[in-house]
Amino acid sequence: MSKHRIEMTDTEVFAELQRVYADFNNDLNDFIEKNKTTYRTHRCFI
């Protein structure tokens, strides 16, 4: 019984970790896209 509980817990933790990484990845991609646009419109020529 306890072994089954640990396996379920590990699966739940892994699923949560996947969600966290997916959210982080999406936020990072949004940040990069916003900065690309900002850089293109505000860059200085030296």
Image (cartoon, helix red, strand yellow):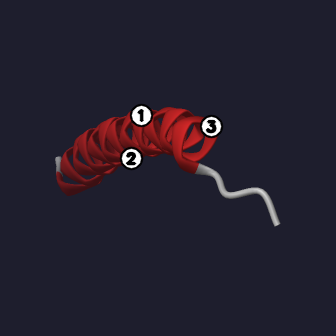
Q: Do the CB atoms of the residues marked 2 and 3 lie less than 8 Å apart?
A: no
* Pair 2/3: label in front: 3
| Quadrant in which the C terminus appears | bottom right
Q: Which residue is mark 2?
A: 24
Where, by quadrant of the figure, is residue 22 drawn?
top left
* Pair 1/2: label in front: 1
Q: Which residue is mark 3?
A: 40
| N-term-proximal mark, 1 vs 2 | 2
Crowd class of label 2 (few under 14; some 14 to 19; many from 20; radius 10 Å):
few
Residue 36 left/right relative to 19? right
Q: Residue at x 77, y 57 (%)?
A: 45
Q: Residue at x 44, y 37 (%)?
A: 34
Residue 6: give x, y in percent of width and height: 26, 54
Q: Residue at x 33, y 38 (%)?
A: 23
Q: Do the CB atoms of the residues marked 1 and 3 lie less than 8 Å apart?
A: no
* Residue 34 drawn above or below residue 13: above
Label 3 residue SS = helix
* Residue 2 drawn above or below residue 26: below
Label 2 residue SS = helix
Q: Which residue is mark 1?
A: 30
Name the residue nearer the viewer: 7 or 33: 33
| N-term-proximal mark, 2 vs 3 | 2
* Pair 1/3: label in front: 3
Q: Mark 1 and mark 2: span between their CA atoms?
A: 10 Å
**Badge 1 amino acid:** Asp
Residue 43: give x, y in percent of width and height: 63, 51
Name the residue nearer the viewer: 6 or 27: 27
**Badge 2 amino acid:** Phe
Q: Residue at x 54, y 36 (%)?
A: 41
Residue 8: give x, y in percent of width and height: 25, 40
Q: Mark 2 and mark 3: span between their CA atoms?
A: 24 Å
